[in-house]
Amino acid sequence: MSSTGPNTKIFKRSDFYGLAMMSSFFGCLVPTTLAYILFSTKRMRRLPIFWVQAIALAFAFIYTCMEIAFFRNDHTVNPQEELEGQYWYDEGQAAAGFRLLVPLIADIAIVMKVAAFYPHHVGPTPKRLLIIGFPSALLVARLVMQIITWVNYSGKGDQLTQALTAEITLQVFGNAFCSILLLRKTFDLARNKHLSTRRAQRRLAHLIEALLMTFIPAIIVQFSLMVIQFIDVTNTRNGNFGRGPPSTFEANIYRGETYCQQANVIVSVLFGLLATLWSSIRTRSEDLTATNSANAAESRKTGSEVAPAGPYASNGPINHTSTFGGSSRPSARTGSTGYNREEDRPLLSFLVDAHAPIDVRDPTSSRVGEEAFDLRLRGGALQSSDQHQRGQSFSSHQGYKLASAGQYDLENASTNAPDSIQDRTMGPKSVEY
C-alpha cells in the first residue's frame, strides 16, 4: 500500500466534481424553496411537517454555502500541524457536521408521513406505537451517533469511523422500514373493494409511484454510503492521521465518503419533499385537466345518482380535495360550515393579486354537475311535481326535483328549499390519501 508524502492533498483538482455537485444542488434549492413557501396554504403551514421540511431546507442552504466556500485546492493533512484525531480539514468540520444533521432533520418528515398513514383512530394503539416508535427510536440513536462523531471530529476520540458507520446503518434501516410501511399501507388501500372506481385506482397508482420514485434513489445512495463506511472501518485508521499521511487508497475512500454524504444530503432533502407532496400534486393536476374520458363517465354517473344537479353541485360529495402529507383529517373544502376561503389560499396569490376573488371549488366537480344537469334535461329525467311539494323533505339521492309545468326552476329550488335539505345535500366527506 503506497503512501503519499506530507501535506497530502485528499481532494485534488480543486475537487471539481464535488464543487459541481454542490453548485447544482444550490441551484435546485432556490426554486424549490421559493415554490415551497409561495405555494403553501395556511392549512399547510399549520402542520408540523411543513416546518420540519422548512428547517431542513434552511439548513441545506447553509450547508451548500459552506461547501462551496470551502472547496479549494488546499485541503491537506499534515501530521506536523497537530492534526491528530481529526478526520477532515479544520475549516470543513462544520460542513461535515451538517452533512449528517441535514438528512436527520429531513428524515423526521418521513416518520411524520408514516404517522399520517396510521392515524390514532385506526388500528390498535400498541401496534401504532410500534410502527411510529421504532423509526423514532432510530432517529434518537442516530442523533447520539452524530454527537459521538462530532466529538471525534474535534479530535477528542478515536472511534470516528465506527460512529459514522453506525449512523448511516441506522439511517438505512429506518428509511427502509418507513418505505415498507408506506408501501404496505398503500397496497392495502388498493385491495379495498370499496375503492373500485378508476379515479381511486389512479390516485393510489400515483401514490405508489411517488413512494417508489422518492424512496428508491435515497435508499440506493444511503446503501452505497454504508458500503463505503464498512470498507473504511476495516481498511483505514479511523481518521487518525497522527501515524502518518493517508495512503492513496485511504484518500480515495475519504473522497468517496464525502461525495456519498453530499449526495445523501441532496436526496434526503429533495426526495423527502417529493415523498410528501408528489402524490397530491399529481392528483390535483389530473383533476384540473380531466383527460381520462372513462373516469369522466364514471364521475357523471356518480354525480347523477348522488349529487344535486346544476352548477351549485360543487358542495356535493364529488368534491375532491388534495392533502398535504402529515395530516389525516378531511379538508374543510368538502362542505363544512363556516369555512373561510382565505384558509387554503396560497401565499403566492396574495403577492400577485391580493384583491382577486377566490374560487376554491373543484372545477371538475362543477363541470360534472353541469354535465349531469344537461343529461337530465335532455334525457327527460326530470319529473313533474306539484307546487305544494316544494316545502317537503327530499332525499340526497334525488336532489332538487322541483318542476312546474315541465320546466326546471333552479333559482327557486335553491332559495325556497329548507335549510335542512341544503345541509343533507352536502354529502359525506371524501376520503383523503
Image: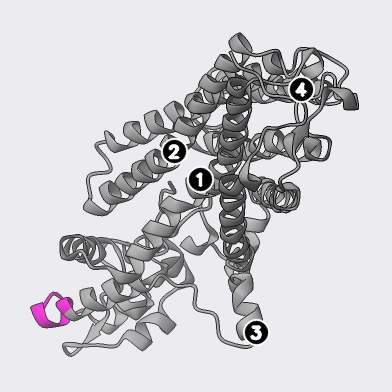
Q: Position of residue 249 (x, y in %)?
A: 58, 21
Q: Does the segment drawn in magenta span residue 380? A: yes
Please state which amino acid type lies under the numbered disc 1: Phe
Label 4, secondary structure: give it.
helix
Label 2, secondary structure: give it.
helix
Label 3 sits on residue: 354
Label 1 sits on residue: 271
Tell me which residue sits at (56%, 65%) in the image. Answer: 337
Eye-nearest disc, 3 or 2? 2
- Disc 4 crowd rating (10 Å Cα; few below 14, some 14-19, many 20+) is many
Q: How many marks?
A: 4
Q: Identify the image quadrant of residue 141.
A: top right
Pointer 3 or 2: first along the chain: 2
Please state which amino acid type lies under the numbered disc 3: Ala
Query: What's the mark number on residue 217?
Result: 2
Query: Between marks 1 and 3, how big is the CA–CA gap?
Result: 32 Å
Label 1, secondary structure: give it.
helix
Tell me which residue sits at (74%, 18%) in the image. Answer: 160
Label 4 sits on residue: 149
Disc 2 vs disc 1: Cβ atoms closer than 8 Å?
yes
- The span picked out in magenta is 375-384
Q: Nearer the viewer, residue 36 or 313?
A: 36
Please state which amino acid type lies under the numbered disc 4: Thr
Eye-nearest disc, 1 or 3? 1
Query: Between marks 4 and 1, how big is the CA–CA gap?
Result: 25 Å
Query: Between marks 2 and 1, how big is the CA–CA gap?
Result: 8 Å
Pointer 3 or 4: first along the chain: 4
